[in-house]
Image (cartoon, helix red, strand yellow):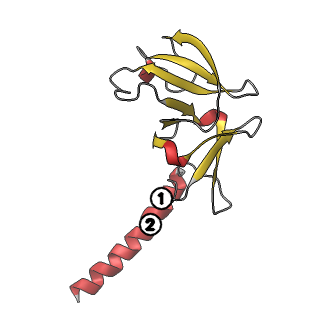
C-alpha cells in the first residue's frame, strides 16, 4: 500500500502534518492506527462510548475514546482509551480516519492510499502474464 516509502499524514483542511509512517501500526481503507503522533492535537476529553458518524460505527461499539481535532478544529480521529475485542491491544493508540486527512509519500510525488479495485485488477493481470510465462518456460 505504501510501496515501502515513508509518508506523512496531514490535515485535509489546514495541511498541518499530524504524523508519519514511522509510528504507523496498521492501516486499512477507513483508518490508520498510530502509537504516537508528531504534533499535539486538541483532545476532547469526554471519554466517549458512543461512536462518531463514519463507516466504522459497528466496530467501535464498547470502545472508550476521546475525539481528536487538529489545531484548525477539524475532526481527524480518536485516541483509544479502552478497546473492544476488535481493537484489542490498541488502548492508548490513535485511530486517524482517512476521510479527514491526506497523505504524501516522501521521495515520490504521489499520494499514499489504498489501491482501487481497477488497480488491483491490473496488477493481477500483470501477475497472470508473468506466471503464465514462467509456467511455459518450466514446462519446456
**Side of 106 relative to 138 (left or right):** right
Q: In the rendered image, which quarter is residue 17 located in?
A: top right
Q: Quadrant of residue 107?
A: bottom right
Residue at figure coordinates x 29%, y 83% from the top left: 136
Q: Is residue 52 visible?
A: no
Q: Indicate the quadrant containing the C terminus: top left, top right, bottom left or bottom right.
A: bottom left
- Give coordinates of residue 106: x percent, y percent: 63, 58
Relative to 54, 73 lies left or right: right
Residue depicted at x 47% and y 63%: 123
Residue 11 in the image: x percent, y percent? Answer: 69, 37
Q: Secondary structure at mark 2?
A: helix
x, y percent for residue 25: 44, 41
Identified at 61% across, 39% down, the residue is: 38
Q: Where 103 falls versus 42 (above or below)?
A: below
Instruction: Find the residue positioned furthest to the bottom.
Output: 140
Q: Residue tagged by mark 2? A: 125
Q: Residue at x 52, y 54 (%)?
A: 2
The picture places residue 59, in percent across and down from the top left corner, at 42, 23
C-alpha span from label 1 to label 2: 6 Å
In the picture of the structure, the residue carrying the numbered disc 1 is 121
Residue 19 drawn above or below residue 80: below
Give the tally of numbered discs. 2
Q: Is residue 104 visible?
A: yes
| Contact? badges 1 and 2 (CB < 8 Å) | yes
Secondary element at image label 1: helix
Which of 121/25 is in front? 25
Q: Is residue 34 above or below residue 114?
A: above
Q: Residues within 10 Å of mark 1 (few under 14, many from 20)?
A: few
Front in this rendered view, residue 55 or 66: 66
Residue 72 is left or right of residue 4, and the answer is right
> Does residue 79 lie above or below 62 as drawn?
below
Amino acid at each position: 500500500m505504501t510501496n515501502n516509502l515513508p509518508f506523512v499524514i496531514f490535515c485535509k483542511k489546514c495541511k498541518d502534518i499530524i504524523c508519519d509512517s514511522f509510528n504507523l501500526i496498521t492501516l486499512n481503507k477507513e483508518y490508520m492506527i498510530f502509537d504516537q503522533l508528531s504534533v499535539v492535537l486538541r483532545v476532547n476529553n469526554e471519554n466517549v462510548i458512543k461512536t462518531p458518524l463514519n463507516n466504522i460505527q459497528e466496530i467501535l461499539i464498547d470502545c472508550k475514546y476521546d475525539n481528536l481535532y487538529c489545531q484548525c478544529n477539524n475532526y481527524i480521529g480518536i485516541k483509544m482509551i479502552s478497546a473492544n475485542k476488535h481493537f484489542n491491544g490498541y488502548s492508548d493508540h490513535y485511530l486517524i480516519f482517512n476521510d479527514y486527512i491526506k497523505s504524501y509519500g516522501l521521495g515520490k510525488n504521489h499520494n499514499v492510499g489504498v489501491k482501487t479495485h481497477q488497480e488491483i485488477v491490473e496488477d493481477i493481470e500483470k501477475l497472470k502474464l508473468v506466471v503464465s510465462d514462467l509456467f511455459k518456460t518450466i514446462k519446456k
